[in-house]
């Protein structure tokens, strides 16, 4: 089995999505977002941007990755680039392509690039999604991977500028799944999750990322909005656990962050640009 480099750069067919106020409210409530404009549905919370593109997310991989390996795919990193907020009434059109992959001793990482535009063609957001195929080294590097957002360890010489504690509710995944349009059974069915080698139902990675987005916005940018939000998913989060996000100043209008459950790092290499 090999990845097929001929499938790189092939755009998927455009997918349309109509943004409603009720859908924005549902997503904010499903991620415990306290920001009034998000809870009222006046504007989308940042990570809602995954919802209009969800149908296009893995489709490009069908051109490159052997289908027998799809059961080994993990969502490794997410990098949003926001050009403007999503608002109720928006008619959005998304498409995606796979840009590259790299074989590594423990698996293969690969990048999907997505664009979300308004009906008139204006760019609303871009996304780089890095996934990891466990236990399969395709043996080569082809194309380009996602831009880096690695945490600068020198930042630890100073104390964090903010620390935000949050709680993941016991029913979080059952609210987030419908709000995001993500029916993956490892988030909803305990038996399926355990059969996959997990301790039980785990929270959606993008739900945890949404928690970090409002942690940043409420603590260091109460009057601002995100231009970029990027993370690496380091470990699963379980319903009922407590999150603690530490945020460091990393330059003008730029913040680095990481999120822990106890002593376990669950989100690393976090970057927020305003």
Image (cartoon, rainbow, N blue to C red):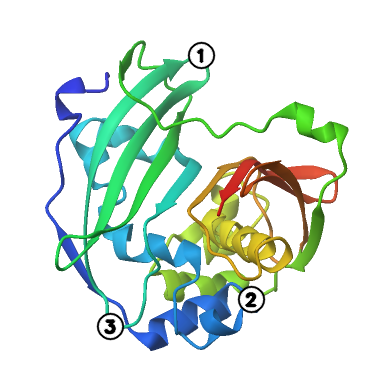
Work out how far the residue at label 1 is from the one at label 3, CA to CA, in angstroms. 47 Å
- Judge depth for marks 1 and 3 and give the one in front: 3
Residue 98 coordinates in the image, percent (x, y):
26, 35
- Judge depth for marks 3 and 2 and give the one in front: 3
On screen, residue 240 above or below 9: below
Residue hosting label 2 = 32
On screen, residue 113 above or below 239: above
Residue 151 coordinates in the image, percent (x, y):
66, 33
- Identify the mark at residue 105; answer none if there is no mark: 1
Work out how far the residue at label 1 is from the one at label 2, CA to CA, in angstroms. 39 Å
**N-term-proximal mark, 1 vs 3:** 3
Residue 210 coordinates in the image, percent (x, y):
57, 62
On screen, residue 10 above or below 241: above
Residue hosting label 3 = 89
**N-term-proximal mark, 1 vs 2:** 2
Using residue 22 as the reference point, say whether residue 66 is left or right of it: left
């Amino acid at each position: 089995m090999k990845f097929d480099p001929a499938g790189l750069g092939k755009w998927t067919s455009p997918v349309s999505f109509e943004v409603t106020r009720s859908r924005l409210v549902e997503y904010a409530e499903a991620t415990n977002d306290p920001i009034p404009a998000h809870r009222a549905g006046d504007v989308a919370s940042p990570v809602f941007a995954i919802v209009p593109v969800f149908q296009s997310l893995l489709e490009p991989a069908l051109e490159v990755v052997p289908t027998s390996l799809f059961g080994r795919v993990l969502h490794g990193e997410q990098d949003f680039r926001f050009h403007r907020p999503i608002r109720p009434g928006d008619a959005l059109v998304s498409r995606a392509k796979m840009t590259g992959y790299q074989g590594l001793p423990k698996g293969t990482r690969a990048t999907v690039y997505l664009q979300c535009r308004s009906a008139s063609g204006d760019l609303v957001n871009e996304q780089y999604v890095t996934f990891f195929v466990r236990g399969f080294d395709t043996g080569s590097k082809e194309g380009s991977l996602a831009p880096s957002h690695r945490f600068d360890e020198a930042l630890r010489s100073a104390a964090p500028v903010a620390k935000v504690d949050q709680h993941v509710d016991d029913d979080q995944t059952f609210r987030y799944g419908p709000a995001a349009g993500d029916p993956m059974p490892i988030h909803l069915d305990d038996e399926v999750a355990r059969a996959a080698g997990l301790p039980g139902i785990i929270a959606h990675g993008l739900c945890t990322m949404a928690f970090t987005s409002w942690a940043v916005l409420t603590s260091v940018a109460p009057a601002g909005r995100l231009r970029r939000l990027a993370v690496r998913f380091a470990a699963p989060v379980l319903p009922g656990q407590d999150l603690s996000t530490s945020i460091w100043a990393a330059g003008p209008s730029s913040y680095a962050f990481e999120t822990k459950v106890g002593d376990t790092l669950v989100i690393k290499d976090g970057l927020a640009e305003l």
